[in-house]
Image (cartoon, rainbow, N blue to C red):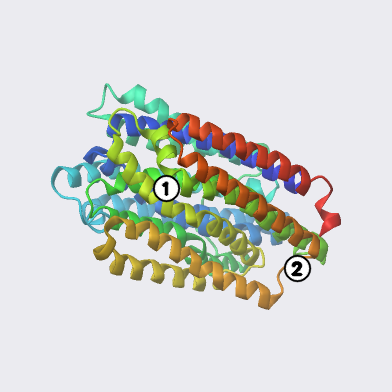
Amino acid sequence: MGFFKSIFSVSLLTMVSRVLGFVRDQFIAFFLGSSYLSQAFLIALRIPNTFRELFAEGAFSSSFIPTLAKVSHDKEKQQNFLNDSFSFLFITLSLLTVVFIIFMPQVITVFAPGFTGEKFKTTVHLAKIMFPFLMFISLTTFFISVMQNLKKFLIPALTPIIYNIVLIASIFAFKDITPNVAVALSYGVFISGIVQLIFMYYFVRKQGISVRIKLPKLTPETKEFLLKFVPAICGAGIYYLNILVGSIFASLFDGAVSWFYFAQRIYLLPIGIIGAAISTVLLPHLSSNLQTTNLKEKHFLQNNSFLLNIFLGLPCALAMCLLSVDIVGLLFQYGSFNLNDTLQTAAMLKILGLNVLIILFNRVFGSMFFARNNTKIPAIIAFFSFVTNLILLFTLTKKIGMLAIPYASFFSSLVPFLIYIVLIIKRNYTHLKRGVWRKIFLVLFANAILGVLFSFISKTEFIPFVKIAMAAFFGIGYLIYCGSILFKRKVAHTN
């Protein structure tokens, strides 16, 4: 499957998953609002999700796929590497799961220092139910990485859809036989991990690939993987760690955990659809391409990733910054989620929207280094990001309250963005010709017009649904018009 077709297919399935995710979040908002049950569930879920993103989706895949690509020509080496890396992941996560379940009260004290009383006890209980999800979904990610290395992207893109379907179903299946909806959702998270693991294992086996658990051996391939895996935890995972730290600080403000979560769900939509699709497809393609001397193809992959980021990401950022109240109100203001919840969530979303394009580029920049088997540089850059985030949270929280969280998120992403730009130019990792620059300026000009239209719409007295419909109309027109100009001929001829 071609580069653009792969991106489009993954984006489409990711969009379906995100739509289901919003349906799921609407049910959470409807039944729980910003209550203590909502905050307890979201913090409890954040813990295994953060470790999943650190150990599996971020660090594991970014160090695993390039190494697997190098040994794919030798079936024996490939099989040994698969067995050793799978065993390493299984043993590590098994121990981590047992330790965390035993010491969960102490863990919650660290992750939610503002929680006390019934809120604290509920969070501990929900976290114990959900934490095994970490093991199931991490092993699932192993099989996803195997499929992606084979350039099979569609099946892996279905796993988030399964996750959301199971969670939505669990609300209605368990809400009448469990104490509350938060507990019902927690069991849904647990079950979804098992279902996704079975699903991915089945399709990997259909590719003729099998793995077995054994005592891992430190082969040259395994050693290379582990040496890259540890710094990759910092490089690929620091973004998720910053989200976790933001949730920790949000626990100090009543209701802020829920507001921060719902704002994140909106602002992560384009990052999840655009960024995940581009970086998911870019990493294996670029890893394989760098084994050759085809510089033209390398620049084609990277430059069009940049162009797609701006073309698709900038309008989303404008909408979040200019129409935040209407977006939040339309999506979540039902049932227990009231007007105050909408306004507080929108205040966070407006700031987080500034971050969208920066994070999209940081993902592509990171993939450019990971594909070159360089996990050290992203790890160092990530360290500066993490330190920036902590410093700003500690200094701004007392001055501007919970809004320190989205501001810290923005500046902690801006720091790595600027460092990546300097390093990529210095190392001559990419080359933008005049044709690419013309397309970038066209997109920027079109977005300036789009921004004026969004600003005008935001000042009208129409109900949120009409405002968002108007913005969507202009947004679709932008995509059709600019897209027809940008991609009317093969990009390879213009690069």
Kind of residue indicated by mark 1: Gln
- Give the mark nearest the N terminus, 2 or 1: 1
In the rendered image, the residue lying farthest to the right is 493
Q: Residue at x 59, y 50 (%)?
A: 313
- Label 2 neighbourhood size at 10 Å, few (<14), some (14-19), many (20+)? some
Classify the position of the C terminus by image quarter: bottom right
Does the CB distance between marks 2 and 1 fall below 8 Å? no
Examine the image and state in which quarter residue 477 appears. Answer: top right
Any part of residue 346 in sight: yes
Q: Residue at x 33, y 56 (%)?
A: 403
- Residue pushed farthest bottom? 426
Q: Is residue 421 above or below residue 109?
A: below
- Residue 310, position as x, y percentages in the image: 63, 54
Side of 223 relative to 354 (left or right): right
> Which residue position is annotated with label 2?
431
Q: Nearer the viewer, residue 193 or 54?
A: 54
Q: Quadrant of residue 374?
A: bottom right
